């Protein structure tokens, strides 16, 4: 832009001279005028700088809003602390790094709703607030606070992008007008506030159209409509989440291009990263494979879109960072602006990690009014931050889906997000990065594999989560590039690159059974194209270790490269590294010994931000102890992959091959596997067999706990009770065992996370189906069947031991009965209903197992209690999902303690952690509203995508706050009851009486209504009307409205649905079909009778149909005075 501007000034001066106006202004004056920004902030920026800033977090992780906001929020806090500004954070997500001690000055674990945020503002009196670091949740809350006049009343200034600019980007009509002012075009689109308006808009634009919700994240409620019927279905669903829908002209098949743009208050503006979606328009960018920098744009297209991006961002007045998305016609230079996100987004985290340019950190500094040229470039440590990175490598991002966990959810992907995480791979060419990324998404995948899915034209045309493997099969089957382009609209350049991989796989297969004759150049080329040792071994029918030995003998070794975003113009100082076979020398020396920590890998259901908290905590503790650290991880959403967290960051695969390669290069003091969840544990034995120094618990002990058969045998040998069990040998003996102990029985594979392929069988047919799934998942590892104990209480124990001696124990109790996965259960700590005698018995069991396994470091136990008996069901010799929750609630950092123990430090035993007098309740965050067809009944396989936790003086207060944090709305008027068994109806009688006394209108299915009417409760009976009515009943039924009619109109604000399993009661699935975002919100609340009374008190204290404005400050059940109340966690 600078050279362009200078040239403009020169041309203008020459033109004026030619026209005889040369004396008007000198070239110096013209340059000064061109360089001066008239709307720059007036006065002393130091004086205008805030002293205390409130940061709104993003709450529980959900589809569309995941760990990237932990990373961006942590960066913002770091940036503000450097400027000596006090920080106050509101975020109920207890698993995040940003809510840890040592970052923000104060942390409120409270719902991010206008009522709660107003209370915090009233108590804290900040003079600035950041809205753009907590995703759509924070943005929407901030906009509501501005409209309600709260920020103005308390003199709180919105830092960075003004609310007016945010609203310009969120309100489609205003956005279109703003773009027309500067001659730019938005995809033809109309906003609609009703179904009729949406239908009229679609008629004007012409089908097919794209329907989207305004003020939504991750394309919630969006989709393509090819006709009027599809439009009505989509729009009706969208209006359950929003008051405005956008109807867009379909541009399916166009390229989707994104730019991350940074602008300061003085109008300095740069594009930091340009990214290209491999999938064409029509697939949400969060669902698409993304490549940076763009590979298929020519120079003209690149600069045309870059100029437009800068023009748009300057016109909108955005201060900080934003993301702009374009649709580009592949056959011409025609383009449309799709949207602008005036906040940090998923793409921002990806762009930060792809370029090494810390966007969130820079955006926070710019929000304070600091000019861009005054900030330092963190890659060179000498140049300024007003540079545009130029990359000498290629980055590929691939999303991770967990759709197999949901039986009835469509695997088709489109404009609405379904992915739960993403990975980023770095290579020196597309093929290398692409194959790395495929393995990162799923550790069982070897790369671009043609054997995963069969060829299907239908699947190529209508993409699914596995389309990339269908593409591999199609290339292998001889489909031409042209035919594949017609079917997929994926750019031919990418298809040619994929063909390179397939062609080389065919060449490798020609050496089957005679790999000794393979020329070194063929193996070298395979490694340069991103083939793993295991992938090569599969092609030549050998083993991974044999290929590894051959490769090392031939001196085909990876080199370590630094992320160099100034393409060698300046020496890079960064410790941000990756391995590649497309290089000749290492970029750095390996002189000092380090300690290597393996991260958690991709976020998935079951392994999320809590394991990142553990990994970061471990690194920080190691650094405090004076050790140099290496982090290996590949997740762009995490804080652990922020390169200033450790001494060396390897952004690469967590596989035996890559970890071993790094180990042999670095020769570290040892490797810590226990901080990253299941993925590092899975490679423990393979590393151990190669004499890798594993720090902490020995890999043999890890195997004894992970291998279901060995663990069950171990418990028997030390006399600890467990449910009756048997190892699967064949189907007949399994059926015989189940008949002997009686159904239900639970099928448990080994070495799995989040209960994958774990199921409760109620019959022989269930057993056959579930066993085949489990064997497929567990592969070489054993599958165990055990008796499923019903109506038992589940207890979680997190502990740290040193050489088998337990030094700290934290106990949490589940609110739900055993049978709900611990990741989906509501946890309470310290436990409220466990007797001192039972606590002593739990301690004895933990000590015995710790001793037997000789644990050094963290471990987790799950027990069930019934009829005064305790039985152990599982042990994980690693950190668990609940480590951050118990550490922050009970005031002892278990990860720091475990890190000290692992490194051989002497620690003071803590014993049983009892806390500081407050109660913490952890509640799961579900994303069912994004997964049409998902069964909302919880079971032994995990389905939640995140979690929140809040504190209180008792569990009812903490529970209510935690529920509100997940998006639960307290019902105002109408509640539906549909309760299956007589036992449940009786148990819920006092609860239903309470709801009636609070003034709710109660509706119930016929059997439920009869029962409560008999007990003197006023209930309106409504029927399901599932079965086809005969003609005599049809007339009567037409006048009666069914439950489904009411649900379609969103008549009920809460549904309490306890169905009778396998007894043909009303299917809970139907509730989900109506877009209810929780697994029947009342269900979790009311499943445990002992918890019921506390919930009544919570409802009585803060709610009821008349509940409107928030209670006053002394109503501490809902709002908190930080100095006096533990929900504020001052450090």
Image (cartoon, grey):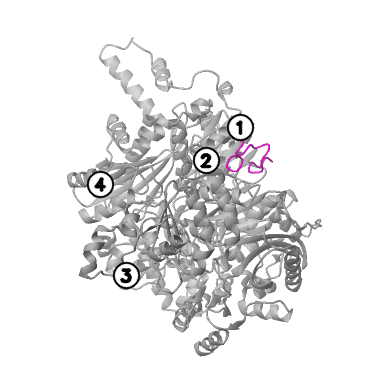
- Picture coordinates of residue 428 (x, y %)? 47, 56
Residue 719 position within the rendered picture, expressed as x and y whole percent measured from the top left: 73, 79
Magenta stretch?
A: 1113-1131
As drawn, the label of residue 195 is 4
Q: Is residue 872 magenta?
A: no
* The one of 198 and 1064 positioned closer to us in this rendering: 1064
Near mark 2 (Cα within 10 A), the count class, few <14, some 14-19 or many ≥20, is many
Q: Which residue is mark 3?
A: 474
**Disc 2 marks which residue?**
360
Q: Pointer 3 and pointer 4: residues touching (CB < 8 Å)?
A: no
Q: Between 353 and 721, which is closer to the camera in this rendering?
A: 721
Q: Is 1117 within the magenta?
A: yes
Q: Earlier in the sequence, mark 1 or mark 4?
A: 1
User: Which comes sooner in the sequence, label 2 or label 3?
Assistant: 2
Among the 4 quarters of the image, the one containing residue 483: bottom left
Q: Is residue 1026 above or below residue 415?
A: below
**Quarter of the image where the C terminus is located:** top right
Q: Are marks 3 and 1 in contact (CB under 8 Å)?
A: no
Write the residue at 43% across / 74% down: 1063
Q: CA separation, marks 2 and 3?
A: 41 Å
Circle on res. 790: none
Label 3: how many residues lie within 10 Å, few (<14), some (14-19) or many (20+)? many
Q: How much space separates mark 2 and mark 1, taking CA atoms? A: 24 Å
Q: CA distance from mark 1 to mark 4?
A: 44 Å
368 in relation to 651, above or below: above
| Earlier residue among tags 3 and 1 | 1
Query: Is label 3 or label 4 in front?
Result: 4
Could you tell whether 989 is left or right of 466 in the image? right
Give the class, few, some or many, for how many residues have Cα within 10 Å of label 1's Cα (few <14, many ≥20). Answer: some
Of the two numbered discs 2 and 1 in the rendering, the one whose residue sits closer to the viewer: 1
- SS assignment at label 4: helix
């Amino acid at each position: 832009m600078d050279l362009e501007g200078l040239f403009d000034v020169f041309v203008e001066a020459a033109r004026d001279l030619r026209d005889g106006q040369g004396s008007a202004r000198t070239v110096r004056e013209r340059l000064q005028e061109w360089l001066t920004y008239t709307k720059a902030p007036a006065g002393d920026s130091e004086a205008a700088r805030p002293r205390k800033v409130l940061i709104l977090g993003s709450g529980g992780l959900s589809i569309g809003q995941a760990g990237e906001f932990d990373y961006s929020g942590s960066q913002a806090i770091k940036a503000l602390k450097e400027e000596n500004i006090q920080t106050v954070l509101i975020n109920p997500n207890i698993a995040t790094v940003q809510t840890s001690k040592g970052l923000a000055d104060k942390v409120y674990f409270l719902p991010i709703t206008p009522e709660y945020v107003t209370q915090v503002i009233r108590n804290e009196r900040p003079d600035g607030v950041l809205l753009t670091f907590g995703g759509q949740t924070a943005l929407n809350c901030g906009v509501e606070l501005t409209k309600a006049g709260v920020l103005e009343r308390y003199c709180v200034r919105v830092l960075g992008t003004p609310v007016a600019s945010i609203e310009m980007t969120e309100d489609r009509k205003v956005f279109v007008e703003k773009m027309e002012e500067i001659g730019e075009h938005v995809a033809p689109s109309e906003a609609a506030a009703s179904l009729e308006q949406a239908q009229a808009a679609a008629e004007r634009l012409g089908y097919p159209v794209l329907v989207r919700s305004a003020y939504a994240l991750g394309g919630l409620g969006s989709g393509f409509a090819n006709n009027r019927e599809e439009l009505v279905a989509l729009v009706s669903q969208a209006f359950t989440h929003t008051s405005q829908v956008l109807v867009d002209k379909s541009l399916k098949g166009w390229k989707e291009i994104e730019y991350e743009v940074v602008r300061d208050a003085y109008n300095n503006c740069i594009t930091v990263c340009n990214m290209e979606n491999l999938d064409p328009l029509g697939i949400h960018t969060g669902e698409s494979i993304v490549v940076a920098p763009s590979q298929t744009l020519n120079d003209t297209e690149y600069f045309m879109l870059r100029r437009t991006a800068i023009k748009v961002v300057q016109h909108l007045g955005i201060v900080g960072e934003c993301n702009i998305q374009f649709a580009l016609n592949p056959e011409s230079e025609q383009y449309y602006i799709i949207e602008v996100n005036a906040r940090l987004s998923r793409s921002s985290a990806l762009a930060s990690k792809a370029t090494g340019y810390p966007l969130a950190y820079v955006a926070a500094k710019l929000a304070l009014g600091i000019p861009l040229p005054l900030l330092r470039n963190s890659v060179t440590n000498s140049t300024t931050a007003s540079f545009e990175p130029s990359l000498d490598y290629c980055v590929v991002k691939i999303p991770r889906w967990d759709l197999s966990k949901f039986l009835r959810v469509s695997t088709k992907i489109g404009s609405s997000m379904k992915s739960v995480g993403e990975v980023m791979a770095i290579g020196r060419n597309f093929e290398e990065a692409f194959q790395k990324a495929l393995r990162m998404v799923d550790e069982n995948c070897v790369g671009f594999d043609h054997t995963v899915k069969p060829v299907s034209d239908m699947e190529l045309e209508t993409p699914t989560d596995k389309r990339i493997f269908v593409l591999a099969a199609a290339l292998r089957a001889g489909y031409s590039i042209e035919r594949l382009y017609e079917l997929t609209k994926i750019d031919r350049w990418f298809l040619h690159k994929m063909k390179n991989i397939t062609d080389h796989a065919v060449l490798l297969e020609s050496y089957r059974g005679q790999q000794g004759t393979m020329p070194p150049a063929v193996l070298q080329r395979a490694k340069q194209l991103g083939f793993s040792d295991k992938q090569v071994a599969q092609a030549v029918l050998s083993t991974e270790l044999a290929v590894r030995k051959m490769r090392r003998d031939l001196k085909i070794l990876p080199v370590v490269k630094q992320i160099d975003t100034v393409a060698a113009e300046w020496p890079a100082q960064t410790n941000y590294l990756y391995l590649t076979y497309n290089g000749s020398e290492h970029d750095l020396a390996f002189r000092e010994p380090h300690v290597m920590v393996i991260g958690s890998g991709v976020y998935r259901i079951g392994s999320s931000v809590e394991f990142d908290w553990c990994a970061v905590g471990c690194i920080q503790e190691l650094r405090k102890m004076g050790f140099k650290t290496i982090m290996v991880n590949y997740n762009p959403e995490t804080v652990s992959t922020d390169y200033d967290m450790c001494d060396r960051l390897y952004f690469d695969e967590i596989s035996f091959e890559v970890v071993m390669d790094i180990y042999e290069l670095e020769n570290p003091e040892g490797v810590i596997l226990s901080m990253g969840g299941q993925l590092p544990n899975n490679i423990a034995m393979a590393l151990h067999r190669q004499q890798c120094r594993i720090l902490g618990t020995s890999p043999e002990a890890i195997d004894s706990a992970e291998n279901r058969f060995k663990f069950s045998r171990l418990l028997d040998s030390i006399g600890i009770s467990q449910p009756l069990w048997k190892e699967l040998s064949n189907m007949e003996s399994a059926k015989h065992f189940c008949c002997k102990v009686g159904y239900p029985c639970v099928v448990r594979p080994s070495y799995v996370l989040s209960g994958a392929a774990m199921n409760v069988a109620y019959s022989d047919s269930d057993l056959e189906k579930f066993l085949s799934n489990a064997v497929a998942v567990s592969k070489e590892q054993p599958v165990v069947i055990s008796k499923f104990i019903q109506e038992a209480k589940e207890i979680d124990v997190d502990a740290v031991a040193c050489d088998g001696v337990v030094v700290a124990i934290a106990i949490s109790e589940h609110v739900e009965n055993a049978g709900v996965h611990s990741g989906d259960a509501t946890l309470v700590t310290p436990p409220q209903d466990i007797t001192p005698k039972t606590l002593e018995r739990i301690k004895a069991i933990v000590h015995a197992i710790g001793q037997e396994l000789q644990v050094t470091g963290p471990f987790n136990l799950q027990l069930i209690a019934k009829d005064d008996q305790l039985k152990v069901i599982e042990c994980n010799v690693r950190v668990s999902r609940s480590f951050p929750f118990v550490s922050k609630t009970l005031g002892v950092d278990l990860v720091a303690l475990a890190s000290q123990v692992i490194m051989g430090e002497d620690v003071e035993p803590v014993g049983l952690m009892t806390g500081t007098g407050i109660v913490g309740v952890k509640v799961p965050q579900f994303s069912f509203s994004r997964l049409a067809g998902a069964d909302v009944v919880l079971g032994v396989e995990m389905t939640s995508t995140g979690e929140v936790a809040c504190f209180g003086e008792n569990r009812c207060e903490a529970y209510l706050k935690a529920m509100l944090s997940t998006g639960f709305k307290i019902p105002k008027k109408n509640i539906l009851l549909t309760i299956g068994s007589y036992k449940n109806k009786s148990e819920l009688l006092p609860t239903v009486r309470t709801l009636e006394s609070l003034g709710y209108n109660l509706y119930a299915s016929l059997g439920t209504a009869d029962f409560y009417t008999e007990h003197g409760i006023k209930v309106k009976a409504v029927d399901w009307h599932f079965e086809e009515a005969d003609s005599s009943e049809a007339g009567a039924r037409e006048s009666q409205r069914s439950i489904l009619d009411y649900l379609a109109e969103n008549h009920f604000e809460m549904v309490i649905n306890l169905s009778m399993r396998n007894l043909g009661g009303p299917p809970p699935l139907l509730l989900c079909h109506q877009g209810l975002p929780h697994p029947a919100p009342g269900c979790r609340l009311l499943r445990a009778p002992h918890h019921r009374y506390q919930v009544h008190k919570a409802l009585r204290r803060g709610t009821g149909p008349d509940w409107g404005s928030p209670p006053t400050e002394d109503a501490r059940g809902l709002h908190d005075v930080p100095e006096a109340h533990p929900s504020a966690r001052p450090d």
